[in-house]
């Protein structure tokens, strides 16, 4: 592609994205497609000769777009968001244009130094102490795996990296502790780091779905007594089901007393800590060894961008660093080489989009957005609480409301739980089938419950009100 053709299509594509961001609300949030329907429209063999951009872009519009789930729709209330914004998209375009691989300082000094600076801004924004240093990872899952590997190496005196895992069952297996509500990425990390799922102890939660520290302390003592080696605690700040917040100050005390690594998974809720009134979310995290949160969820920075902080970066680099001759450079002693801060060697230049976003919104602009989301979620929770036909199933510390349809609640004639589960599944399917909103479900204490998470860049109060209206309408038609 010559530069004039690139320029022409570049303008066309930027125009398309600008229209898309403006009009995303006109699409059905979930596409109405059957499994295999998109693949069937794509030729089984690659083209032998090059095709014109016109044809490629036409097929994008006609074949691909109808199969897109619109994460940046203003009425996306499902899962957690993956929101984006104009400045983030522009930075991604530049980053693609530069095609930088930010593995070493030398492979792009600006990429490394911008990442250092921007991650320190983020550290200040969420109120972590100065000793924490940050690195951008692709996802929270990867960051949690890195944290677990650090914990493993520290607990084994770096012997697993050298000699591999000891043969089972001759050794004293390591134990990792997380709550029953911890994200599946914790168990995945536990598997991949070689601990084994059976050595992940899932500590019970209290009535608010947060980890109960009393059984944790008891488990650790019992594990020591029966020949296990306690290794790490993973605390969750904002669980995926209900945004419950584990008692990190208490967990930090236990970790310190027991000599365990404390990793905090604040994937969604960490963003809210940029609000002074939500700083309490990260209370106790100054005693953590590592913390991750996702600007790609709730800080207007398009996927992927995960902020990983470690209190002692040497612990991370000691576990991750490996230096073949061809990667040595003259500056190694003076600079940060982020290849030693994670799993991959090659790294995308992600700091650029975070920098564009923070500068373009300003900290206050980001705060305003998050405050709105939190206020509208609280308002929605209020509507649920006042309704005779709905009930709330969990507290709302940030932007996610867990609730269900339960028309028997006022008459104190509750329907059997299976019946309520069935009706709430039917309600979710009905509201999602309208194409006007998208929300998802979870189970809390065994009950099927609907979740509404407010976190999209374009969402307004009216969108949340419409979700409530649709839920009531569709519930009215349920048998
Ligand atoms: C979303 C989420 C994750 C996983 O995030 P990825 O960046 O997709 O790996 C981990 N933990 C919690 C609590 C989450 O909500």
Image (tube, rainbow, N blue to C red):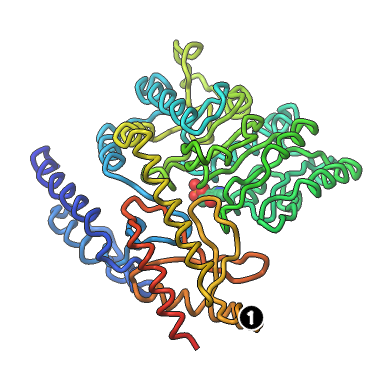
Q: Which residue is painted at 46% across and 25% down in the image? A: 120
Q: Position of residue 2 (x, y in %)?
A: 11, 39
Q: Which residue is label 1 attached to?
A: 418
Q: Is residue 232 above or below residue 196?
A: above
Q: Quadrant of residue 150?
A: top right
The extreme bottom residue here reads: 479
* Towards the viewer: 177 or 362: 362
Q: Nearer the viewer, residue 367 or 111?
A: 367
416 to 97, vertically: above or below: below
Could you tell me residue 238's position as x and y percent? 57, 49
Residue 390 coordinates in the image, percent (x, y)? 53, 73
| Secondary structure of the residue carrying numbered label 1 | helix
Q: Position of residue 240 (x, y in %)?
A: 56, 55
Which residue occupies 60% across, 82% down? 408
Q: Where, by quadrant of the figure, is residue 70 drawn? A: bottom left
Q: Is residue 277 left or right of residue 67?
A: right
- In the picture, residue 467 is in which quadrant? bottom left
- Total marks shown come to 1
Q: Residues within 10 Å of mark 1 (few under 14, many from 20)?
A: few
Residue projecting furthest to the right: 225
Residue at 55% from the left image edge and 51% from the top image edge: 397
In the displayed structure, does residue 87 sit left or right of residue 103? left
Residue behind label 1 places its C-beta within 8 angstroms of ligand 1? no
- Please state, as top left, top right, bottom left or bottom right, where the N terminus lies in the image: top left
Judge whether 474 appears above or below 98 on screen.
below
Name which residue lies at 70% across and 41% down: 233
């Amino acid at each position: 592609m010559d530069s004039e053709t690139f320029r022409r299509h570049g303008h066309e594509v930027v125009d398309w994205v600008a229209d898309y961001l403006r009009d995303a609300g006109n699409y059905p949030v979930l596409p109405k497609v059957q499994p295999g329907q998109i693949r069937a429209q794509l030729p089984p063999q690659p083209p032998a000769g090059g095709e014109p951009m016109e044809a490629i872009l036409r097929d994008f519009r006609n074949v691909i777009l109808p199969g897109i789930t619109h994460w940046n729709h203003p009425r996306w209330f499902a899962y957690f968001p993956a929101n984006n914004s104009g400045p983030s998209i522009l930075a991604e375009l530049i980053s693609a244009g530069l095609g930088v691989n930010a593995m070493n300082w030398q492979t792009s000094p600006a990429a490394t130094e911008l990442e250092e600076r921007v991650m320190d801004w983020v550290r200040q924004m969420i109120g972590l102490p100065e000793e924490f240093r940050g690195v951008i990872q692709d996802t929270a899952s990867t960051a949690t795996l890195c944290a677990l590997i650090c914990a493993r190496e520290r607990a084994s005196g770096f012997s697993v990296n050298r000699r591999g895992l000891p043969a089972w069952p001759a050794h004293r297996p390591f134990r990792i502790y997380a709550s029953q509500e911890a994200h599946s990425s914790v168990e995945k990390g536990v598997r991949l780091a070689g601990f084994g799922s059976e050595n992940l102890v899932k500590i019970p939660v209290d009535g608010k779905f947060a980890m109960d520290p009393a059984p944790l302390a008891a488990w650790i003592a019992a594990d020591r007594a029966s020949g296990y080696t306690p290794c790490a605690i993973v605390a969750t700040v904002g669980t995926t089901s209900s945004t419950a917040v584990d008692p990190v100050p208490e967990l930090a005390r236990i970790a310190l007393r027991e000599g365990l690594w404390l990793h905090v998974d604040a994937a969604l809720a960490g963003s809210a800590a940029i609000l002074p009134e939500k700083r309490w979310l990260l209370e106790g995290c100054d005693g953590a060894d590592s913390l991750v949160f996702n600007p790609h969820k709730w800080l207007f920075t398009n996927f992927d961008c995960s902020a990983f902080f470690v209190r002692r970066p040497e612990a991370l680099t000691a576990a991750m660093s490996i230096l073949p001759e061809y990667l040595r450079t003259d500056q190694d002693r003076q600079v940060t080489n982020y290849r030693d801060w994670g799993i991959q060697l090659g790294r995308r230049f992600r700091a650029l989009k975070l920098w564009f976003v923070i500068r373009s919104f300003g900290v206050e602009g980001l705060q305003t957005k998050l405050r709105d989301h939190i206020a509208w979620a609280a308002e929605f929770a209020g509507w649920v609480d006042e309704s005779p036909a709905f009930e709330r199933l969990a507290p709302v510390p940030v932007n996610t409301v867990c609730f269900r349809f339960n028309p028997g609640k006022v008459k104190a004639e509750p329907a059997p739980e299976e019946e309520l589960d069935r009706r709430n599944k039917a309600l979710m399917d009905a509201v999602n089938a309208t194409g006007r909103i998208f929300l998802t479900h979870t189970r809390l204490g065994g009950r099927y419950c609907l979740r509404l998470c407010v976190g999209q860049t374009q969402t307004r109060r009216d969108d949340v009100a419409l979700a409530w209206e649709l839920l009531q309408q569709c519930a009215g038609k349920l048998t």
